Amino acid sequence: MSGMSEEKDIYILAIETSCDETAASVVKNGREVLSNVIFTQIALHTLYGGVVPEIASRKHIEKINQVIEAALEEAGKELGEMDAVAVTYGPGLVGALLVGLSAAKAVSFAAGIPLVGVHHIEGHISANYIEHPDLEPPYVCLVVSGGHSHLTVVKEYGAYEVIGQTRDDAAGEAFDKVARAIGLGYPGGPKIDRLSREGNPDAVCFPRAKLADNAYDFSFSGLKSAVLNYLNGCRMKGEEICQADVAASFQKAVIEVLVEHSMHAVREYGYDRFAIAGGVASNSSLREAMARACSENGIRFYHPSPIYCTDNAAMIGVAGYYEYRKGVRSGLDLNAVPNLKLGDRTHVCCLEPGDSPL
């Protein structure tokens, strides 16, 4: 008789409500997504030119139960089959985060399963594991989204070293502001990505910021201001503005900085794997430029499908699985932390041998 026993499958119910997507997912063993249900509020917030926190929170309250039920149904699983519930507790909009947290706590208490708090950015990084079974730490990951621009060394599952970050505007924030300035509206990222394909990326030479004290840090506020000054100058002189050329030139400036810093980090740290994550990681030109740079440098390049780049609960389920396996548990007093730093573990605890999982 063999002394080996098969390891039990672990099912995580995940919940994400950090901004304007109400999402729930069931993830098996940290890599297999059984369901990924997302209710997006983009159309609603487009009316206001950006996310309105109070409206986002109210819509989350309306949809959260339906989304959780749909995720379980799509996965063909019952709540009683879940081993834990993972939930985003920061960073994000505090009112939006509290809706997901409240729902997750209720599930944890009612079903008698552990609650695992997950960092939103760790979720984005973990999205890469869904479609790339060969990807394991250590590697360098660039996280670019509406609120964050981080260059991170992923040392092991759940262990991160932030080596570079934005000093001012995040990359996605700059995309949204420039899109608004040239009359494209919200959301700016996808609209600039599409329009740029019709423009000349060398039409306008916008600045690329270099920071003397940290070669890995980013700054996009100067670039944004340069675009605004260019547009104002054209209007004052009565010159015609070609939206596509401005969009393409701006996008090229952002992408060149992101690629340059990322490749510098990979070379300096000596890793042969590089990943991107976050909403801006779905930008087609960024993906093409990163793929080209990685190929030239002999680096394996990883990126999630677009559906896993934007906010979703599957990524939270993946990150939650690895936290759960490490013994990380959150109490029912877990609170939303809107400015939570990447790698901050002060709000969660790890089980000691023999401790109850609840």
Image (tube, grey):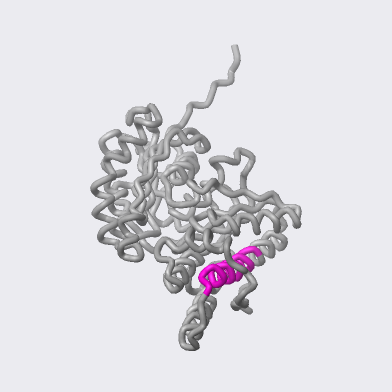
Report the residue at 60% width, 78% height from top: 207
Q: Position of residue 113 (x, y in %)?
A: 34, 36
Side (left or right) of 128 relative to 274: left
Q: Quadrant of the N terminus?
A: top right
Report the residue at 63% width, 50% height from top: 138
Residue 62 or 153: which is nearer the viewer? 62
Side (left or right) of 230 relative to 155: left
- Check residue 37 for magenta coloring: no
Report the residue at 64% width, 72% height from top: 202
- Check residue 255 for magenta coloring: yes
Q: Position of residue 357 (x, y in %)?
A: 38, 37
Q: Quadrant of the C terminus?
A: top left
Q: Position of residue 137 (x, y in %)?
A: 62, 48
Residue 123 or 229: which is nearer the viewer? 229
Q: Residue furthest top?
A: 1
Q: Which residues are magenta?
A: 242-259
Q: Is residue 250 above or below residue 69?
A: below
Q: Is residue 170 above or below residue 26?
A: below
- Tell me where residue 65 sits by quadrant: top left
How many labels, in total? Answer: 0
Q: Is residue 78 above or below residue 331?
A: above
- Tell me where residue 73 sits by quadrant: top left
- Tell me where residue 91 sits by quadrant: bottom left
Residue 169 or 247: which is nearer the viewer? 247
Q: Position of residue 142 (x, y in %)?
A: 58, 58
Q: Residue furthest bottom?
A: 237
Residue 150 or 186: which is nearer the viewer? 186
Q: Main secondary structure of the magenta part?
A: helix
